[in-house]
Image (cartoon, grey):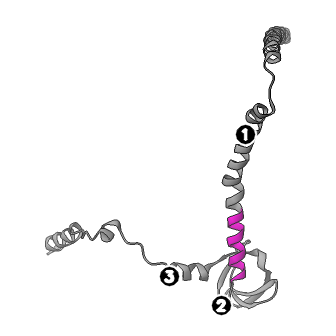
Amino acid sequence: MNKKKIVSAVASGLSTAAIAVSSAMSAFAEEASSASTAASAQEMTPSSAFLSMGLPMLILFGLLYFVAIRPQKKRDQEMKEMQANIQVGDEIVTGGGIVGIVVSIGEDTIVIETGGAKHKLRIKNWAITENVTAAERMKAEKPAKKSPLATAGVVDDTAKEKKSKKASKDE
């Protein structure tokens, strides 16, 4: 008895869906026939066709370029520069997470020492994902950021007052 209820519910759902589709198709056909008479009165020129289809496509491709393609190319270029500027003695990290110090540099391979036992590994240049030593050098070369107050020549005396109040309370 339960199966009969399920079958009747599915059958009524299918019939309702068929009626909805047929009524939608007839409404679309009526709309299309009225639109075809309007379209015959005013045909699309090539410039209007370009504006209606070509311009949105160009805008989408432009957005795709500036959001996805350009930043990826920039990251790839930075990675290649980093891999080309590796020096003996630099600490590097590979894509697999191996950390080591560069011992020698070949044409397309690099030999690194890892671990306390000074095991040597030969790896390809493209496998290097980070040059820790170069990153530390760049950080040291970059001047420390000044706070906006220091840049403006304003001295923050509140911190000194708090320290002096704490010191007097502790005594």
- Between discs 3 and 2, the one toward the N terminus: 2
Q: Are marks 3 and 1 in contact (CB under 8 Å)?
A: no
User: Is 104 above or below relative to 68?
Assistant: below
Mark 1 sits on what residue?
Answer: 55
Looking at the image, is mark 1 or mark 2 earlier in the sequence?
1
User: Which callout, 1 or 2, points to the residue nearer the camera?
Assistant: 1
> Alpha-carbon distance for marks 1 and 2?
54 Å
Percent of width and height locating residue 92: 67, 80
**50 and 98: which is toward the camera:** 50
Q: Residue at x 72, y 68 (%)?
A: 76
Is residue 81 a member of the stretch shown in magenta? yes
Label 3: few (<14), some or many (≥20) within 10 Å?
A: few
Numbered tag placed on residue 165 in the rendering: none
Q: Is residue 49 above or below residue 27?
A: below
Mark 2 nearby-residue class (10 Å; few <14, some 14–19, many ≥20): some
Q: Which residue is mark 2?
A: 89
Name the residue that disc number 3 marks. Answer: 140
Asked where in the image residue 56 lies, by quadrant, the reply is top right
Residue drawn at (67%, 54%) of the image: 66
Describe the element under mark 2 as helix, strand or loop: loop
